[in-house]
Amino acid sequence: MSDENPLQPPWLNAPPVDPYPFEESHDLRVGPKLHPTLDALLPYIGLWRGRGKGGFPTIEDFDYAQEIRISHDGRPFLHYESRAWILDEQSRPVRPAGREVGWWRPVVVDGRATDELEALLTTPTGVMELHLGKRTGTQVEFATDAVVRTATAKEVTGGHRLFGIVEGALLYAQEMAAMGHPLSPHLSARLVRVGG
């Protein structure tokens, strides 16, 4: 019988560890080498910033600014992070708006990426979405396969997103089904590359 107390695991009193040692980058000139299964998604990697228009049947239309960072750490997925803020009529920031984090992953068969994609996206308001999609050239289209919500989240039941690289800019349009309404236009924006 061991003298070790199972309530005192050996790591409990271990010394502190150094900061996370692996680099993640949205700039292909620095950091880890891009995983070969991500080659077709390379145009998306970067730091993007721009403005858009939002609305939904249950809310008034609004103008917003947004920053999207799409990065990688050498493994076969992209990290996606978006944060937006509401703008007034003079394009001044009013308040923080939507945030999302998630991952885009190409479907790999026999070690090679297909044109099919999977995306997992999570918001701080309690909504998690699994999207399935397809890449066609520099266009990516996603539709929800499943939506999971916390008990206090608004009733989101589906979504559709279209991304594209057009003349060097990141354009997208998002539809949402929520609050008893079918898929309806929700967000659209044009972002320019500011990093990467």
Image: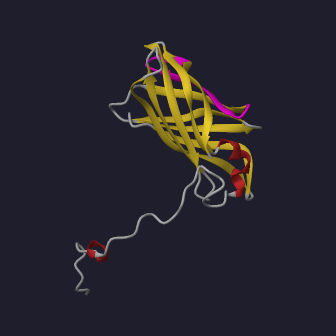
**Which residue is rendered at x = 62% and y = 51% of the image?**
27
**Which residue is rendered at x = 47% and y = 37% of the image?**
100
Residue 102 image point, x, y percent: 51, 44
Residue 90 vertical position relative to residue 47 in the rendered view, above or below:
above
Instruction: Specify how the rendered protein is coloured.
Output: secondary structure
Secondary structure mostly seen in magenta is strand
Count of picture labels: 0
Report the quarter where the N terminus lies: bottom left
Q: Is residue 101 magenta?
A: no
Left or right, 167 with reference to 194: right
Quarter holding residue 139: top right
Residue 127 image point, x, y percent: 43, 34
**Which residue is rendered at x = 26% and y = 86% of the image?**
2
Q: Nearer the viewer, residue 5 or 19?
A: 19
Left or right, 163 with reference to 186: right
Q: Nearer the viewer, residue 105 or 164?
A: 164
Q: Nearer the viewer, residue 105 or 166?
A: 166
- The stretch in magenta equals 167-183
Residue situated furthest right in the rendering: 137
Residue 169 image point, x, y percent: 67, 32
**Which residue is rendered at x = 66% and y = 60% of the image?**
33
Residue 89 image point, x, y percent: 46, 14
Residue 49 vertical position relative to residue 189 in the rendered view, above or below:
below
